[in-house]
Structure formats: C-alpha cells, structure tokens
Image (cartoon, rainbow, N blue to C red):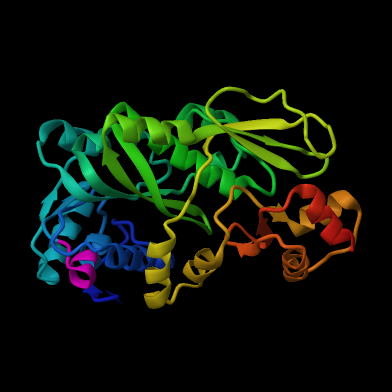
Amino acid sequence: MAEGLAKIRVNHDVFYNPKMQGLRNISVSFLSAVGSSGRSLLDATAASGIRAIRYKKECDVGHITALDINRKAHSMCASNMKLNKVGAIALNTSIQEYTNATDQRFDIIDLDPFGSPAPYIFDIMKVCGNGTLLMVTATDTAVLCGAHSDACMKQYGSRPLHNELCKEAGLRILYSYIARVAAGFNFGMVPLLGISDMHYMRAFVRLESGALAAARSAKTNGIGGFCVKCGGFELWSGIGRLCGQTCQNCRSDMEGFGPIWTGKLYDRQLLGKMAEQSNEGIVRIVDDELDTPMFYSMPAMTRRMRKGSVSHYKIIERLRQKGFSATRTQFDSDGVKTNAPVSEVSKAIGT
C-alpha cells in the first residue's frame, strides 16, 4: 500500500492504522516547516516503519534509527526500509535497553506507543540534546481526560478534568509531564504544536539545555481551578495551591486540577508555515486559534444558564464587537477561545 511517498507491506501481525494517516501528514508538515534536512532521527516505536520512511522521503531527514521490541514488527520495518531504499538501522530492542546502551544523541525523536507515553519519557531524555525535537503521542485519552482519574495520577502525577474542558486539560497535562521530566535532565521545554483529535493527543516540543531553561519551563507548570456552577476557570503558574479557591465570578468553590502546563501551546510562526502546505483541516483551525488557556463550550454554558442553543460563531462575533479576542478552537467544535472573562461570555450568550 502507498501513503505519501512511501510504499509499505503490512499484515495482521504488525500494527498499522490507516486512520492515523492524517496525523502522519501533520508530522510530515511539522518537520518540513521546522527544517529537518540531514538531521538524525529516532523512531522509538517504529512498527511498520511508515513514519520514518515518510520522514526520509518527504522531509529528507538524515541518519535514522528505528526501534521495535516486537520481533515481527522489527522484521517488517527492516523489510519496508529496503523496499523504499531508505538506509536505516532497525533494531529489535526496547526503548529502555537502547537508551541505556547508546551514546547517540538525536535531533528528532518520534514516540508513538500504544497507550501512554509516560513510561518512556524518562529514558527518551537520555538520548536528547540541545534543540532536540520531540513528537510524543498519547492514545490513553480516557486517562488524560479524567475517565480514569486514579490512572492519570499514577501515570502523569496530575489530577485531570472530566468535563467539557478535558481535551485541552489533558493535552496540558501531557505537556506538563514532559516538562517536569525534562527539567530533571536540565532541559527546558518549548511547545511548538499540540493536537487533540479523535482518540489521540500529540505534543510537538523542542528541548533547550541549561538550568535557566529548565527552571523557566518548570515554573510554567501550575494548577487550574474550574467552577462547576458557572463554567469559569483560572490557571495559576507554580505548584502552590490545589485548589481551595473561590470563583471570581460567582463566588462558588472551584474544582482543582493539575499540575498542568499554563503557558502557550503553539509556535505561531511555525503554524503559519504548516498552514500554507498542509491539507489537514485541524492545522488551519489551530493556526487561527487564540493561544490562551482553556475555552468555553457553548452547549455546556447554555445548559448551565438554562438558555436555548446558540451558535459559537455568533458568540465570537459578539465578543469581538466588545473588543475582546475570540476564535473557534480545535478542542470543541462548539467551543470559543477568548480572553474575555466568563461574565462577559455569559452576557454574550444572554444577549
């Protein structure tokens, strides 16, 4: 079968998900936009090898090392590399075994495991250097989105949200976890792109060496508070309080969540480059999206207010007329990203 510029053979013994082609397209666009020609790449969970092959043929990455602990997957990955005439080292080993045995440092690392990436982040940091680009996928979205709160505490050390904000909160928990582990290796984390779609979340970040960079990103971790009564929220940088806070809008007690990443999710210049060359609709949505923490879901807000349904486009227009910034969001097809407080959003709905 063909995908992008790659041709691969697959069978039922080796995992290949055709529904994830859109995410692979986004990853190719990301590497093309950021500039990856000649840079070394580790595909830490290679499976069929489709991602690494596409990165080589479409982004001109340099030296490739592809890992898979499954013997049949390793064999097929090596076969597909030969089929595409891609020179690579394909190893039948685990991430832990490889990173503990090598002195290699990689410019780009793709980590796309089955389920949670959390067990592998620590070991991945051993083969990172200054400027390393990490592309990390999480498919344990039920955990990150709060359906299994105890599992999120165990895997990510964070308390999730299980409401209309769960997708963005989950992505910010993933960012936070990467940043906290990276800080232990004296790396700061710079977010470049974050995607939450279907059954996955994907974080694209750059690492920066040094104590100052590590401290700066560590301080960007913080705590959130969500008001069940009015839908308001607040984020506080620094791990100082959880929660015991009162909603500034309606004075109700707030539900605490986190630690989470409280800063920017995107690199705006990079997104502009990606939007010019990508056919994936979610990239264009993110390119237009206001990069502020959290959003307001119109169905959830109108339900709380006992109001009829209202178009998010109409609310965006009303908020802009009042001088606020407002856009749609990737996290909710009926959501609104805005710098307006919940009181102004409520007024816009009630107009």
Instruction: Indicate the position of residue 259 as horizontal and vertical percent values.
Output: 53, 31
Q: Is residue 274 left or right of residue 80?
A: right
What residue is at 52 percent from the left and 28 percent from the top? 238
Residue 155: percent from left, percent from top: 46, 31
Q: Quadrant of the N terminus?
A: bottom left
Q: Position of residue 118 (x, y in %)?
A: 39, 36
* Front residue of this view, candidates 89 and 243: 243
Q: Residue at x 72, y 62 (%)?
A: 323
- From the viewer's side, name the closer residue of 195 and 77: 195
Tell whether position 8 is magenta: no
Residue 233 appears anywhere in the view? yes
Q: Quadrant of residue 217?
A: top left
Quarter containing the C terminus: bottom right
Main SS category, magenta section: helix
Q: Is residue 335 above or below residue 237?
A: below
Foreground: 49 or 194? 194
Is residue 229 positioned above or below 31 on the image? above
> Within the image, what quadrant is residue 227 found in?
top right
Find residue 244 and report its horizontal and vertical position in percent: 72, 23
Residue name at image x 53 percent, y 36 percent:
260
- Is residue 182 something that shows in the picture? no
Range covered by the magenta-colored residues: 55-61
Answer left or right for 257 relative to 97.
right
